[in-house]
Image (cartoon, rainbow, N blue to C red):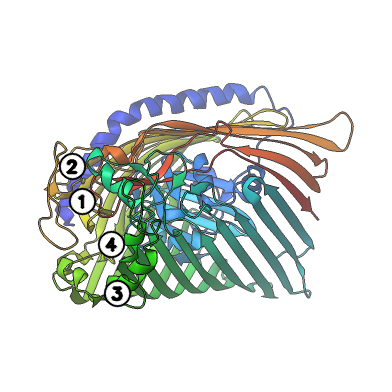
Amino acid sequence: MSNVKKSKIIIELFGNMNIRFLPLMLLIVLCSEHEFSLAENGGQGYRLEEVTVTAQRRTQDVRDVPIALTVVSGDEMRDKAISDLTDMARLLPNVSINTDFNAMYMRGIGTAESNVIGEQAVAYILDDVYVPRLDFLKPGFVDLAKIEVMKGPQGTLYGRNATGGVIKIDHGMPTREWEGFVNLASGDRNIKNYEGAISGPLTDKISFRLALRSAGEDGFVENLVTGGKSRNKDIEQARISIRADISDNFSIDASYYHLDYYIGAFFADEIHKYPSQLRALGEVLTPGFESNLDRRNFNSSENESSGNGYIAPIKFTYDKWDHTFSYVYGMVGLDDAIRTDTDGQSANAVRMFVDQEFEQISHELRVVSPPGRFQYVAGLFYLETDLESEVGTPLYADFIKFLNVGGLSPDGLGLGGVLDLVTGLVTNDDGELSRLDGYFTVDVESFGVFSQVEWSITDYLVMTLGARYSDDKKHGTAILTDAGPYPIWGVLLLGGYTADETLIFRDFSPKISLSWEPHENVTIYSTFSQGYRAGSFNIGAFSKDKYVFDAEFSDTLEAGVKTSLLDQRLRLNLGAFYTEYDGYQLGTFNGFTFTQSNANEVRTNGVEFDMTLLAAEGLILSMNVGYNDAKFVDFKDAPCRTEAPLEPGYQVQGLVALPPSPECDLSGKELHRAPRLSGSFSFSYESQILDWPLKFVLGGDANFKGGEYMDPDLDPDDYQEEYWIYNGRIGLKSLSESWGLEVHVKNISDELVKTYSGDLTLQPGAHWALTNPPRTVHAALRLNF
């Protein structure tokens, strides 16, 4: 992006923000005036706990951080029975997460689900280690201490692939005193969540912490072919950490986190739309065929993603000259396997296999100055990753045995054995007529240097200046061939292709912020920053010209107010944002071919509000609301939605790599995965029962999400209408909180909604979906010691 264009964008950003910011400025003044009068009334002896964060690489009060930031503690997550990011998203406005299908979007900005090796738009930081794969978040949380969610581009301190935001996850750390906990949960669908941790000293200088978790559940989607259930889960996690205090100013923290997961979901989970033109085909392929959204499917085999991995950081911390020097070395590894029935029918016709091996080594060196009028953070970052991926998509012949015509099938007529013999003569040993084989590698070297300086111009006015230089080098290879025995795929691929590409991307991302405290409990801030996401390779490309996609750049302006009122019993935060993306990366599967491309210009623009009120002793009320107006500003070469034959607007789509490949103009249309309005409202109440050593516990939350398109082609059949989800809990706990027993009900009204929707393979106009779990009841026992 040229400097001239950057300057123009900055001017436009300020112009747009000024109009929207006037009501906010008025609210800030009113809050400030009100706080003075409240302070005179004095306190009532109880207040909200202070919230500290490390979002800017130093420990700070959350009110001193000039960005949109949500903090959720591990205790709050356990109280609300939230064990993974998908469930946590209900607390976060303008956020859509589905770890079962590689979906993570903030303010409408995310990563294409169809590209399993694509660059992430949201950066994940686990125990100070950058993790570029959403797969590491599939198992959920073990011994969670805190999550910090930073929305919008965070390029200065977190660098590459943080154009949507950052999720920073901290686990429990070793302690100098013995402590631990045990969580035991069990409920509907054989839900289990067994988690525990123990921590304490080994010597006078060495302490440790060990955490274990075993979780799982039976599926909730009825498979009418196998008679079983889809969407099963089985999770195993273990984490051990050691802290060595070598001296008063030198320490070493090392940990090893292992994860093992089976997620019974990935693709074509449930057919919910089938055009009348193809209805006869569906009834031939599947006896008893129907296409209602009802948590039932006809898959001939289970869709699943399974794998295991590790994250092993070691951190050296040295305090000298009132500065803190730290070096973090991280090792990351993952083996993942995807198996999916892509046609969604009981007749076994098309499947897909994806096997991946991923390894990463990272180094980060940081220096943090002491607090003062001038304080700074600076550092160097280096990362290497290696990925190997094998893809197989076989076309089978044995689906012929299951074809249903007039209620009869060859297998049902006793002809299955004859067809076995016939198909055995024309297929390979695996019963395949033709098989697409792909082999992909991606090697990445990334270097970054960054710095951020905070200058207290006065006691009430602080300026923050930051910048990061990034240098990314990527080498990718691809081989896509027809493995026979018949060259069906070879024809569809126009012979296949081989690619060997090296990509180099360089970027300089600046940041400037101003924070003003008109009152000791009110902070007003404004921030301009830029972000960057490197280009990469498309594992789903069926032709060489679709294999590479370009980098993405962003410019954002945020402004807001953060307050602590009513003698620290009320926190009110309000922020407005405006972001423009140049070359926004997105991809989709239209039923015939995968596309990964760059939208020329995308804009997100909105407001976010959150409130936490300690209304009475033991009663906390919370509200989080987000508004987002997100659009494709310029996207003339967008993928077209696939219509059924003879439908209005029908365009012929080339099969796989065959022409034609029509393009549509989505300029001015709303962005997918960006509901205009979303929010969460919750309460938590605790009260001692008489003078007994017991507390009564009651809590609940109501979560709203506006309508959203699930796929970039904006097909109305992939649209989810607005909805509410309600959750509740009731229980008892000891006055000392050494134990607690609660009953949780999730999705109280048993709402059925799509969490993803897309095109079905080789059946134009047909659509599949993933859905949310039904109403679920479980009991949870917690012991603290």
Q: CA distance from mark 3 to mark 2?
A: 44 Å
Please name whichever residue, 225 or 650, is drawn nearer the observer in this view of the structure. 225
Mark in front: 1 vs 2: 2
Tell me the amino acid under the disc marked 4: Phe
Q: Kindly identify which residue carries mark 1.
A: 599
Tell me the amino acid under the disc marked 2: Leu
Q: Residue at x 23, y 65 (%)?
A: 541
Q: Is residue 107 visible?
A: no
Residue 659 in percent (x, y) is at 10, 59
Mark in front: 4 vs 1: 1
* Discs 1, 2 touching: Cβ within 8 Å: yes
Q: CA distance from mark 1 to mark 2?
A: 9 Å
Label 4 or label 3, whichever comes before in sequence order: 3
Mark in front: 3 vs 2: 3
Q: Kindly identify which residue carries mark 3.
A: 427
Q: Secondary structure at mark 4?
A: strand
Answer with left or right where residue 672 lies relative to residue 550. Answer: right
Relative to 540, does residue 484 appear above or below in the rendering?
Answer: below
Q: Secondary structure at mark 1?
A: strand
Tell me the amino acid under the disc marked 1: Ala
Q: Kindly identify which residue carries mark 2.
A: 666
Tell me the amino acid under the disc marked 3: Thr
- Tag shown at residue 508: 4
